Image (cartoon, rainbow, N blue to C red):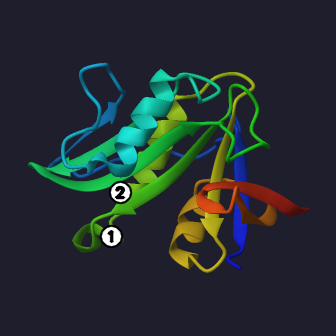
Amino acid sequence: MVKYFFYFQNSFDRNLSELTLNSRYRFEFWKPKITSIIPSGLPLFPFGVWWIMHYLRIFKNNNYGIFLVYDGDILVHRSGVFPGYFRFPFMSQDDIQIGDIWTHPEYRRQGIASFAIQQILILKNKPGRIFWYIVESNNLTSIKVIEKLGFKKIGEGVKRKRFGFGLFGTFIIEKKY
């Protein structure tokens, strides 16, 4: 069974200098609209499903979105912003989770993921909000990024199947620190 580490950061816990990105990149925070199901460069699955969840109000709040970084027309990074829902029972009403992060292999180790996460923290800052980050325990690169950004490890856990399906799985914190 895959083990996960659970990280969090309170809204105003940041004490880091603001990161910058090379001027050749453009970035945006995409929000779903009735006429915009997915951002340019992303597949319909799973992003269309998240759009549906947003409009059916399955998420605990309306902060679902995706931070995108492009080099010209090439999508080089995405970071999802997800409100709590049934997969994350430990999240409160206003909390958000930063996840489904991906950087194009040719653009890794350039600070793009760190920049994107920091921008999300700035854009989505709200008193009392907790930012969550869940990572497989063997993903050392992702762990290094999130710890560098000041997130604190709160525990370890697993994803348990629901109704016999991993798709409906729930993340459970089994051991708190």
Report the residue that reaches farthest toward the front.
Answer: 163
Looking at the rendered structure, the kind of residue marked 1 is Arg
**Could you say which quadrant of the image residue 162 lies in?**
bottom right
The number of discs equals 2
Mark number, residue 19: none
Coordinates of residue 105 in the picture (x, y in percent): 28, 73
Spatial separation of the CA atoms under disc 1 and disc 2? 7 Å
Residue at 48 percent of width and 47 percent of height: 117
87 vs 65: above or below: below
105 vs 73: above or below: below
Q: Is residue 28 left or right of residue 163?
A: left
- Which quadrant of the figure contains the N terminus? bottom right
Report the residue that reaches farthest toward the left.
Answer: 72
Residue 58 shows up from this direction: yes
Mark number, residue 112: 2
Residue at 39 percent of width and 49 percent of height: 46
Q: Is residue 36 left or right of residue 96?
A: left
Query: Where is mark 1, residue-wise?
Result: 108
Q: Secondary structure at mark 1?
A: loop
Coordinates of residue 4 in the picture (x, y in percent): 70, 68
Q: Nearer the viewer, residue 28 or 174?
A: 174
1 vs 113: above or below: below
Coordinates of residue 7 in the picture (x, y in percent): 71, 56
Q: Secondary structure at mark 2?
A: helix
Residue 152 shows up from this direction: no
Residue at 57 percent of width and 77 percent of height: 140
Other-residue count near label 1 (Cα within 10 Å), few / some / many at <14 / 14–19 / ≥20:
few
State if disc 2 and disc 1 touch (CB < 8 Å): yes
Q: Nearer the viewer, residue 33 or 24?
A: 33
**Could you say which quadrant of the image residue 154 lies in?**
bottom right
**Could you say which quadrant of the image residue 121 lies in?**
top right
Looking at the rendered structure, the kind of residue marked 2 is Ile
